[in-house]
Amino acid sequence: MLIDQFCFSLDVSKLKEGSVIWESPSNIALVKYWGKKEHQIPENTSISFTLNQCKTITELTFVKKNLTEEFSFDVLLDDQPKPEFKSKIATFFKRVEDYLPFLKHYHFVINTKNTFPHSSGIASSASGMSALALCLMDVEKLHNPQMTQDYFNKKASFLARLGSGSASRSIEGPIVVWGNHPEIEESSDLFGVKYPYKVHDNFSNFNDTILLVDKGEKQVSSTVGHNLMHRHPFAKNRFIQAEENISKLKSILASGDLNAFIELVESEALTLHAMMMTSLPYFILMKPNTLQIINKIWQFRKETGLPICFTLDAGANVHVLYPSIEEEKILKFINTELVAYCQNGHYICDKIGFGAKKQ
Ligand code: DP6
């Protein structure tokens, strides 16, 4: 599957050397991507809030070399060599090679760091792959200086998706849709697009406080989990439900209905984990403290009527979502009632952000 719109022919005489730095955020899905076809095509549309604080900062240095059969690159995390990251990046390079014909003409040094601890259980693939894709787009830009900002963003998202599906939603913000949906204009399976409609003020300043329940490496990777949707007994209905939830969320984002938002977002989180629990082999990524926190949130919401809800990604950590104007009351609740369930009492205060930035 070659997508012509993102191909270009290389003029080797114009190869330049240099280095670029991009910082790219993580994102948290409201309607989840879980299940994919060949070539990183999602089984259903997903939508996410772009985050602001949790990000990867990647410096890419590119030096010309003679054309070779293999890719040539070194990877560093926090200035230390990370050979264990190499196979994932080599797979990514292989997937994007047709779209970046300069890859084998350079030796790259990829020096990356995260603003969140590596061992926090927070997936770094969305921020990491999007930061690398953006750096590579800057290299392409040296060859195609006339490219538009729109093309730059779309192709960056397209490349990021080939590294990790959710990374396609990290280029822009505050809300991004990935997957072709009949009710979202310009939406595509190939790249994420900025949510194109007006969003009610209730959603313009949202916090995401990430409670770090389990900082360990997860037992089942997302890639394995996605694949288990292939023979999953409930997959077909799940994909239909996700598309319906995108339509529902579109109305909710327009009307500002926080109760409907809470119901949809929590249902999506629990459905994601229900899919894991009903795969073959089945698995559970939630921990006892994940459930303790969920119950505490429900109890607090019932008592106070405050618009607080949770979502989960493929792990045990809990993302607590709420409008920023409620921050004082909700942080007090988190500190008095929820911190006890976090590993070493750790949590990260994040909020909706506006996408990647070049340094
Ligand atoms: C549960 O994007 O990590 O976070 O495409 O295999 O790299 P790959 O998977 P990945 O899956 C993320 C799944 C999720 C839901 C979501 O972010 O939509």
Image: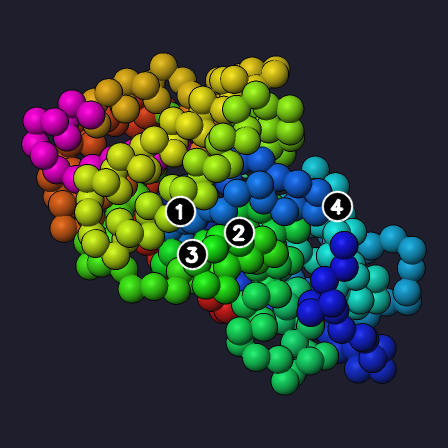
Q: Is residue 183 above or below residue 298?
A: below
Residue that mark 4 sits on: 91
Residue 308 is inside the magenta segment: yes
- In the image, what residue occupies the spot 49% across and 53% down? 181
Looking at the rendered image, the quarter that the N terminus falls into is bottom right
Q: Position of residue 273 (x, y in %)?
A: 45, 25
Residue that badge 2 annotates: 179
Q: Nearer the viewer, mark 2 or mark 3?
A: 3
Q: Position of residue 153 (x, y in %)?
A: 54, 67
Residue 250 colored in magenta in the image:
no
State the residue position of label 3: 183
Residue for badge 1 = 246
The reply to whether the C-beta atoms of the residues labelled 2 and 1 are less than 8 Å apart is yes
Q: Residues within 10 Å of mark 4 (few under 14, many from 20)?
A: few
Q: Residues within 10 Å of mark 2 (few under 14, many from 20)?
A: many
Residue 293 left/right relative to 89: left
